[in-house]
Image: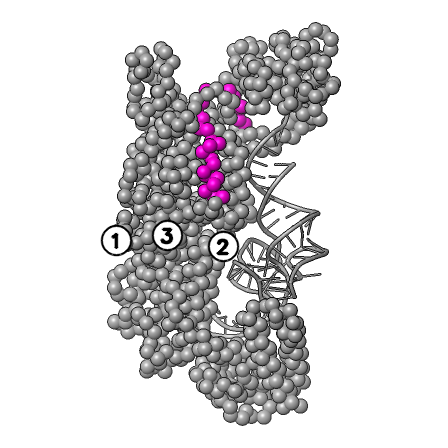
Amino acid sequence: MKKQLEKLYEPKAVEDRIYKYWTDGNYFHARVNPDKKPYTIVIPPPNITGQLHMGHALDETLQDILIRYKRMSGFETLWLPGTDHASIATEAKIVAQMKSEGLTKDDLGRDGFLERAWAWREKYGSTIINQLKKLGSSCDWERERFTMDEGCSKAVKEVFVRYYEKGLIYRGERIINWCPHCLTSISNAEVNYEEQAGHFWHLRYPLTDGSGWLELATTRPETLLGDTAVAVNPKDERYKKYVGKTVTLPLVGREIPVVADSYVDMEFGTGVVKITPAHDPNDFEVGARHDLPVINVMTDDAKITEDYPKYAGMDRYEARKAIVADLEAGGYLVKIEDYSHSVGTCYRCGTTIEPRVSLQWFVKMAELAKPAIEAVRSGKIKFVPERFEKNYFNWMEDIRDWCVSRQLWWGHRIPAFYCDDCGETVVTKEDSAVCPKCGKVMRQDPDTLDTWFSSALWPFSTLGWPDKTPELEYFYPTNTLVTGWDIITFWVSRMIVAGMEFMKERPFETVLIHGLMRDPNGLKMSKSLGNGIDPLEVIDQFGADALRFMVASGTSPGNDMRYSEEKVKACRNFANKLWNATRFIMMNLPEDFDVPESLPESPAVEDKWLASKINTLAKEVNDNLEKFEIGVAAQKVYDFIWDVYCDWYIELTKPRINAGGKSAEDAQTMLVWAMARILKLLHPFMPFITEEIWQALDGSGKPLMLENFPVYEKSLDFPAEEEAFEKIIEAIRAIRNRRAEMNVPPSKKAELFIETDMPEVFEKGVMFFERLASTSEAFINKPAPEGSLVIVTPSARLFIPMNELIDREKELARLNKEKAAAEKDIAIINGKLSNEGFVAKAPAQVVEAERNKLSAAKDKLEKITQSLKALS
RNA sequence: GAGGGUAUAGCUCAGCUGGUAGAGCACCUGCUUGACGUGCAGGGGGUCAUAGGUUCGAGUCCUAUUAUCCUCACCA
């Protein structure tokens, strides 16, 4: 015995020490090792703005379980960690921080701002990493990466230049989603749509020739300032005659044409649409088709420009009010309807986005998407659960060009240079460029790239690409990507695109999708609701193992889960249970006991029963983990430890240990042997406590985390003994059951007379009846005293002489009830077996099982009948 | 408009390839049984949303319906 264990398991006293033990031993580090197969996971890099939240706890736990399982299963296992610069989110935080000091970006200038941003990264970049460690994450910290570190930045430039050279990236004036709060463009994927109550303003625009009006409806009257046409459907008989005429724009007085375009829905509204190419994506397209001017009426913070002095400086909503008032005054307003429609908002700040025409960089996605779609279609990349492939295809098959430029300073600067003299553009990996035409120093594009541009490269940029490193060769493609369904479009799809384009190979084999962690009421955890639960506090209170196990056992792939403190407590209790099982083992163990390699030479039937059961468990846990059924695997380990090992086997060893001798020694051997397997099986789920216990039990000084994960072994399969011992258990249960029913306290012992056709089986159970079934002495096939209580199982009749407790009438009634139940069972099974279809078509195994059930039920009925006879 | 998810015990959820329903918590009854009351033993409690279908057999597969949640697209 190495040390005295406390009565309660105290995770706080253990976890940091164990984590240090692992890192001191460098056990998380993966090497290029041709003798082993690699298994690789790249972490979804958390933002450097981040605090660990429950979503991370779930994500990291699942990854760590897979990594630890594979590491123990003989793979060279790399879990590559890192963080994301998260351009827009981080910049917003820094700007807010500056604001509290009365500073703006312009006060600091670009260089000053970046200096501050890097300081931020220094300060906060490590917090999230330290928090990941609290969870027990076995990442290779020597390989920690950052999306803006030198290597990743090099990869970003390389990709941009290669895209450009292939004509897959271009700069152009397009209508994009503009966030007036973040003051940058954002991509389609970054827009959230939400249903908002609004109005439908019916307006009338006078025909310039004075022949009447055209009535139309709009949800955004303020954009009227930028109208450059009015459109109708070419097939619309009502309006055919107006096409080619002009209307005079109210308030502005501009003469604008009536155009015909099939975009207009005749059924909707009045069938007339005002066209504002600068402020609506559809209108932009209509405008392009009809060669209409694009008139931007708003500044970058969504205020009306100086071109409209009456409204200049008003924000879009103020301007709306003013313009509606003026329209009404001018007689242009027909009516106002309530109208609910969906409005795009910025996924970072929630501000209503403003469609806006501006000069941006775009990646052409259509061609790039093809191999990425094919990779999933062909099964080279699998989503678990499969249904998320639909989400993926849905997005990829209708993909739009990706706006990648951002009007931000924190991020990878676009490697494009412009000549102010001749307008030449150069895209280069160099840090500066000279105009090839006029020899002038060129000006670099001030914009940075979408943060997802660099995360798209994560599976290979972190392994050294574009260089051909041994790591890239060995660890790429990675094996499993674990992430939530909410970033399939942002991240997963773009990694597949980049992987197929630059590596010509899938970036990972399997995408394991998990759900969201919700609060105890099923609501999304969010800062604004203030319902977030801090995993660090949970760890502090209940231990990382408890949190991990709660997360692992409570989830099935793809489904959201609720946080529940009750569940965490149950898992904490489970850890404590295991701890106390260990205390029991160690209490009886000699000083110099080693963890046994194998079973005792001649194991008892219950030892074989345990070995056989643990063997089955190992087989199933491996199967489940291979199929990513992590929750099922966790549940099986839990049930085994609690029910089979603790509640049954440990109890079975007590009389043996008391008796002493060889049987006691064997029992101890078995206890430790089985505990060692249990610790290995549980380790991926609960790494800290298992390692701690292992260190207490095993004198080798080697870590549990590098032991071999148990697998099925033919030599541990004992079906006959397993079945035989189940009969003892069945009998013990039946006795306990009867005694409880009759309210006999366990302290009241009684003799037990066992009448059975399998005396050799029950012979071996005698000592257990005494311990576990309140038996004073057990006799096999020896006539029981008259009037004993009788308990029937399929394999035995159990007589307990407790005459004083027997109420003859009640006994009769009970036996008759049991008889009826047995008869019903038999009828049901007979029904099946006499069904020709069943016998002919059901698998032989199933039929055989039914026959066995039938014979057991018949045996039981027979015994009940005998007992009834004896009683009457 | 298109496509999904979910519906199982009082609550929260499992149920892997179809073989007469499980866990945790809660509840009831016993128990200071030689590690654990963060425990032990026993118990009650489910027409597996509804209606059809496939099958020898359906919680599990198919169709429709209802409820609820979500994704994408559109909405002048």
Please identify, in this view, whether the residue under mark 1 or under mark 3 is nearer the observer: 3
State the SS at label 1: loop
Disc 3: which residue? A67
Q: Amino acid at mark 2?
A: Gly
Which quadrant holds residue A791?
bottom right
Local crowd size for mark 1, using a 10 Å CA cut-off: few (<14), some (14–19), many (≥20): few
| Residue A661 location (% of width, % of height) | 32, 82
A668 or A622, nearer to the observer:
A622
Question: Label for residue A25?
Answer: 1
Disc 2: which residue? A554
State the SS at label 3: helix
A282 relative to A245, above or below: below
First along the sequence among labels 1 and 3: 1
| Residue found 48% across the figure and 39% down from its top | A373
Within the magenta stretch, is there residue A362?
yes
Residue bounds of the magenta highlight: A352-377
Q: Quadrant of the C terminus of chain A?
A: bottom right
Q: Chain of mark 3?
A: A
| Residue found 55% across the figure and 78% down from its top | A734
First along the sequence among labels 2 and 3: 3
Q: Are marks 1 and 3 in contact (CB under 8 Å)?
A: no
Q: Are marks 1 and 2 in contact (CB under 8 Å)?
A: no
Left or right of B74 in this view: A673? left
Please identify, in this view, whether the residue under mark 2 or under mark 3 is nearer the observer: 3
A143 relative to A866, above or below: above
Q: Amino acid at mark 3?
A: Ile
State how far apart marks 1 and 3 are (Cα).
17 Å
